[in-house]
Image (cartoon, grey):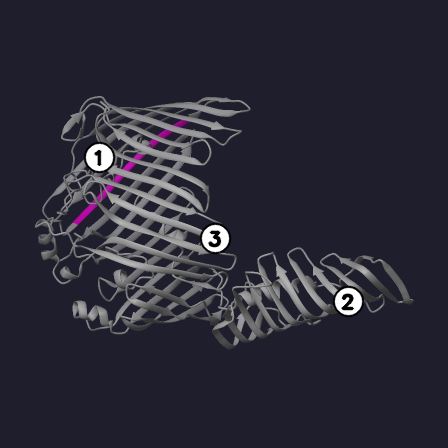
Amino acid sequence: MPKQYSLLRIFSLCFVLSIAAPFLSPNEIEINSIDAQVITTLDPDTLSMEGNVVIKTEQIEFWSDKAIYNKSKKTITLEGSIRVLSKNLEISAQEMEANLLDRTFYITETSFTFMKKNFGGADSIRVYANEKVELLNTSINSCSLEDPAWKLNASSLTLLENGRNAVVRGVNLKIKEIPILYIPYIRTAVGKEKFSGFLSPSLKQGKDGLDISLPYFISLAPNYDLTLSPRYIEERGSGIATDFRYLTKTSEGGIAASNIFQDRKFANETNYRGNRWIAQWSHKSQLSSNLFLNVNTEGVSDNFFFENLNEDILGTKQKNYLTNRLNIKWIGKSLKVEGEIRQYKDLNPFASGQYETRPNISINYQDRFNGLNFNLYSSYTKFAFDKSHNPFDKEKEIKRKTVEPSLSYSKHFVSSSFSIGIGSENLRHDTNSLSLDRTSNWLEAEYKIFFESKSNQSFRSLNPTLKFLKLDADSQPSISIDSRLMSLNYNNLFLRNWFSGPDRFLSQDRVILGIEHQNLGLQNNKNLNLLLGKAFFLDNGYYLDGKNKKTSPLIVEFKHRLKGNFFSNGMLEINSDLNKVYSSNFGLMYEHDENKRIELRSIYKRLNPYINNMPWLDSELPISQMELLTQWSISDKFAVFGKIQKDNELHESNDLSYGFQYSNCCMKVGLMKRKWQDQDYYAWYTNQEEAFKALQRGINPELQRDNIYIFFELKDIGRIGKQISEVISSTVLE
């Protein structure tokens, strides 16, 4: 199961593991060499050393001004400018006593550096023979030894004798000399062990004021754990969240629930007076060597829980519907049988509702003999629509049956490949009032040639592809449940059906021509990938833009690494006359390093009339958006960032964010201003029918939001607010 880190895990990891590990060898520590300016024999067993003393073992080295070594007892006493060195650790001290035979050590007045990024000190460190370790009056930071911006201190830290957990007493956090946090006692796990205790708290300032939660982790067993998280939101009230996880030999999953007691703000807006809650269960199990079960279910108290109470303080993560899903599958060598039940709950009053599957059963059989591949696919699905609001007059119940056998053959040559396949699909829809049946026979053949050349400077390839599709469909059902016209990119162009789902079928015979070109620079990392493709219809044309076309749009895709740190990529779907674009996307990025980046993205798509049935105000307009992202360090400590997302059709900005970040070796501070369009569904909460009428009247259910956010982080301790990288990332145009 995933690791759980307590609030003070940094102590046990950085101090105990890094400091004690070099001394906790399971065997006797053997000395490899001794060197000093003056070496004197005090008696047959004792050496006295002075001046640049260096004692080396396999794990660590001891440096000092003076040392006394007893050969029989294998004890070392060091004095003056002591340094203890290992691969990742450097300790400085004034006195040290070590017994290499039983591996006991005592060091006083120490300071240490771990991997050159964690610093600290202690009055004393004791390592006992029974693997118990004690540190007194110790501290750690990620800044420096001399003048840290913050320090995490403890009066004592003890690694218990089993070596799996530690006890820390008198913990306090200081920024400069200002006390921020004090915990008198805490017990925490070391390494991969799990141990009950507080996790890092969450402190946020968002649209609902101060938002605080303090998780407490409970290790119930090695394969079970529970996290309880009391939460307080300034303008809403208090609540608690739970997260239970389990892992067995055959299954894994989690049950999560969250509750807010009588949300004051929500009550004022909607008159809802009850508790607000969410519950989720996710489960995977392997019932036998071939049988698998997946369960995903979720429920909420009200439709706006995700909009109000999600974990994202920078915006909202609205969900249009909840999904409850039960899936079971049996997978054999040649046979796969799968069954699924899927139900939905609408959360958005403007959602038209989806068909539920009750159930879907599919069988897929594949086998190979004498170079031929045989495939038989069959499915039965019962769709149900029992929503009270049905603006598009959907059938209450539909049964869909599909059977498709196919046979294919493929052959690879030295510089080419060939494949051919034939098949037949029978599709049947049954409703209470009618039955529709369609049989589609198909043949497809593809030939691909590989032209390649390679030199010390570059690798080049040109791969033409020719594909022939012959289809014969005797009828076209008018019912469309889950079929949508897919975006016509290069890969989809070569598919037999350009629609998702089996309800709609592209029945035109066609020849498809594609060319793939790659030019890779082996010395300078410059590269170019270019794809060109087009379909030519042999009989009936392709209905597009209100006309029958004898050819498909030309598809152009490219990825290009330009000179230096410039990258570009894009896709274009354009008509044969090269004067009308149906869809496109483009990206251009300059990236000097992770702190210097500028990226421009754009997307354009004409809406398809077959799926454009929602009465939104801008439903007849194409999708045309542009996004500019930037993050630029103006010095080693200051960086500015920004994001603008604009709707080119409406000539308005959807999202505008900008700010700055200051960071040094141990802390980060950021300030961000954000202004954006958000959904506003409260006015239509109780009447879905009125919501659709409002859209038809031209009402746009949106509101303008304008907030300022603060980001603050003490490195290795925790942060308040979100990562800046999450702010200047795109979730829309990717």
Q: Marks 1 and 3, Cα distance to the nearest angstrom?
A: 58 Å
Across and down, in percent, residue 527 comes to 45, 30
Number of the front mark, 2 or 1: 2
At a point 29% along the width and 61% down the height, the residue shown is: 298
Number of the front mark, 1 or 3: 3
The answer to whether 399 is drawn above or below residue 493 in the figure is below
The answer to whether 684 is drawn above or below residue 442 in the figure is below
Q: Which residue is mark 1?
A: 505
The answer to whether 197 is drawn above or below residue 687 in the figure is below
Q: Amino acid at mark 2?
A: Leu
The answer to whether 527 is drawn above or below residue 670 in the figure is above
Residue 60, by quadrant, is: bottom right
At a point 10% along the width and 53% down the height, the residue shown is: 694
Across and down, in percent, residue 734 comes to 33, 43
At a point 70% along the width and 66% down the height, the residue shown is: 93
Circle nearer the N terminus (1, 3)? 1
Residue stretch rendered in magenta on the structure: 398-410
Q: Which residue is mark 3?
A: 637
Circle nearer the N terminus (2, 1)? 2
Q: Which residue is mark 2?
A: 78
Q: Amino acid at mark 3?
A: Lys
- Main SS type for the magenta part? strand
Across and down, in percent, residue 6 comes to 49, 68
- Say which of 447 and 712 sits in front: 712
Within 10 Å of disc 2 (Cα), the crowding (few <14, some 14-19, many 20+) is many
